[in-house]
Amino acid sequence: MQFEDFQHKLQVVLGMKKEGIYSLSDRDHKLRLSDALFCAEDIVRNRKFFVAIQKALQNLGDEVVVIDAGAGTGVLGIMTLIHGAKHCTFIEENPYTMELCKQVVESFGYTHRSDFLLWDATNINLKGEYNLLVSETIRSDFQSEDFHHIISHLKPYLREDAIIIPERFEMMLTETKTGKSYTQYLSSYKGISGLDLQDLSWEVEVQGRVYLYDDVCIDSGDCVSFFNAARLYVES
Ligand SMILES: C[S@@+](CC[C@H](N)C(=O)[O-])C[C@H]1O[C@@H](n2cnc3c(N)ncnc32)[C@H](O)[C@@H]1O
């Protein structure tokens, strides 16, 4: 399946299912379903993930077993199944989102190659070994979402040769008051922790580039739902 066909089908499926989503009382969860839906509708972001996942699958060969941690509407896991993954375990903490995820996966005809776990991916127990982990649980600042906790927790379930998407981040931190700046590199393979803010103080602007896989990357501002420039307030 080509990206355009995937995105068109996704839009049609989501269009049929989204009634009532904006009035749900789901603020107490990791992310509201309406926000996960917003991500799924971001064509620029989706296209990049589609290409990165295709490349990863080509490099992994047959028998690819996937974890989609923070699955949202299931888009990334579905991409892995489209590109030939044998099985995908979708983990999602918001029950409303998980319900929609199941329906979307079913619409694509992949339920028989999927498991759905309604759980927090930072403390879940899994069975088996996996060789592809996808997790789009990050905004820009490495502080407010669970990405690094998820990667650290799930790494023991990955095989030696497993691929993690996104694979690394390049962040430019600039102190807005003085213009002082530095670049920080973070790798999802190393179980990254939060940003090291060194001796910066006051207000810091964060901009960067995320390498999804190989040469496929997204810069701050490239798309609306992922990895946009953020401002942080640092304790001095
Ligand atoms: C930004 S959305 C992205 C969804 C989807 N992967 C995509 O790319 O469109 C992140 C999703 O991860 C879920 N999430 C965040 N932290 C989580 C955690 N610790 N355990 C399980 N789900 C989590 C949120 O509920 C949300 O649905």
Image (tube, grey):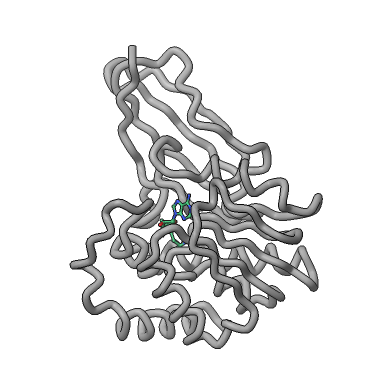
Q: Quadrant of ligand 1?
A: bottom left
Q: Tell me the quarter of the image containing the C terminus.
A: top left
Q: Residue at x 39, y 17 (%)?
A: 180
Is 211 situated left or right of 127 in this image?
left
Q: Residue at x 76, y 64 (%)?
A: 59
Image position of 91 with respect to 109: above or below: above
Image position of 41 with respect to 217: above or below: below
Is 77 situated left or right of 42 in this image?
right
Q: Tell me the quarter of the image containing the N terminus.
A: bottom right
Q: Position of residue 9 (x, y in %)?
A: 43, 85
Residue nearer the viewer, 20 or 211: 20
Image position of 75 with respect to 162: above or below: below
Is 59 situated left or right of 226 in this image?
right
Q: Position of residue 173 (x, y in %)?
A: 42, 28
Q: Residue at x 78, y 72 (%)?
A: 63
Q: Position of residue 105 (x, y in %)?
A: 50, 79
Q: Position of residue 64 (x, y in %)?
A: 74, 68
Residue nearer the viewer, 228 or 40: 40
Toward the left, the furthest residue is 23
Total number of numbered discs in the rendering: 0
Q: Residue at x 59, y 43 (%)?
A: 168
Image position of 72 with respect to 219: above or below: below
